[in-house]
Image: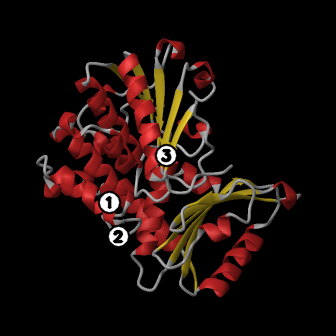
Amino acid sequence: MKGLLPMNAEEYAEKRVKVHKKVREGNNFLIVTHAGPDFDTISSGLAWALYLIRLGKNVTVYNERGNIFESKFGFLPYSNCMVSSISDISSFDAVFILDNGAISRVGRIAEDLKGAKYLINIDHHEDNDLFGNLNIIDDQASSTCELIFGLMEERFINLDIANCLYTGINSDTGSFNYKVSSRTFFVCSKLLSYGVDVEWIKECMNTPIDRDKIDLWGMIYTKREHYKSLALVYLDPETIAGLNFEPEEIKINIHSRLRSIDGVKITVQIQAIKIDPENPKNNQFRLSLRSKGGIAVNKFTHRYPGGGGHPLAAGCDVFGKTLEEVKQDLYKFADQNL
């Protein structure tokens, strides 16, 4: 079974009780965020850590790069406490894996997690692999931060927790431009009641633009290609190697820059994973698609093994085709939907 339909109230209540029971009975917990981190995975991880600490628990937050992203996430409370290595997974009473559609997304710790006593998988991606002992998956949620809020008892939430959660929701919805619902705004209204300073968070998230970022944007605008209302950028290994950014950061910037172009409704990043000039059957391309709304891009990604995602944000790997054939598949999708 791939993914889950939105959880009904009874199912959610049962899973919430199980989480609280596990927390109540345990003392040491590990929170794992995904490689190439974005604000949702880091913010949800830090918020849940701060919550558990308020309950008197010992908490470790893991990202395979530790707190190397200080310039990006440093304004979030507890971000300087993230670690990049774990000596003994079995020492934790439970491991919370947040915002990870697949166990492999956590990075090099994935194999070690086989030794965990209990895995709790909390995510909002439609194609989640359901790898946990307990899976709390709701693909109608705007973000994992939104789900984390629902698991908390409000009397233990404070300003630090609220700041983290609001930041993650703000980021994963593109400043409330997509994947929002009445529940999203209800949660945010609750968070604002704790004193969240929206302007301060906006300022912190929009860090000054350095020269590397300008070079990245220049590459995007130079390499972009258009077909009707679809815009794409193709990245070969040499281009990626020449950029001083993590792959996730490159992807975020490609989509945000292409979305800012007038008339563009679908944005695509095509990344070459493996190119065999002698035999294209060995080729592998990784695609990331975004939609401004009204066009479900996961209809395209579901055509390929392992492909999935949300209607507005989806991805897949394409094997055994040339770059031109991949582009033609995208153009046909555009013809059918734009």
Residue 284 location in percent, x, y?
A: 75, 55
**Mark 1 vs mark 2: in front:** 1
Q: Nearer the viewer, residue 255 or 50?
A: 50
Residue 318 location in percent, x, y?
A: 74, 60
Q: Can residue 208 be seen in this view?
A: no
Q: Which residue lies furthest to the left in this view?
A: 195
Instruction: Using a 10 Å C-alpha cutoff, classify the residue at mark 1 as few (fewer than 14 neighbours), some (14 to 19) or many (20 or more).
Output: many
Checking the image for residue 11, the label placed there is 3
Q: In which quarter of the image is residue 20?
A: top left
Mark closest to the chain's N terminus, 1 or 2: 2
Amino acid type of disc 1? Thr
Residue pointed to by mark 1: 184
| Residue under the image location 48 percent in, 67 percent down | 220
Checking the image for residue 177, the label placed there is 2
Q: Which of 235 and 187 is in front in this view?
A: 187
**Mark 1 vs mark 3: in front:** 3
| Residue under the image location 48 percent in, 18 percent down | 86
| Residue under the image location 20 percent in, 52 percent down | 190
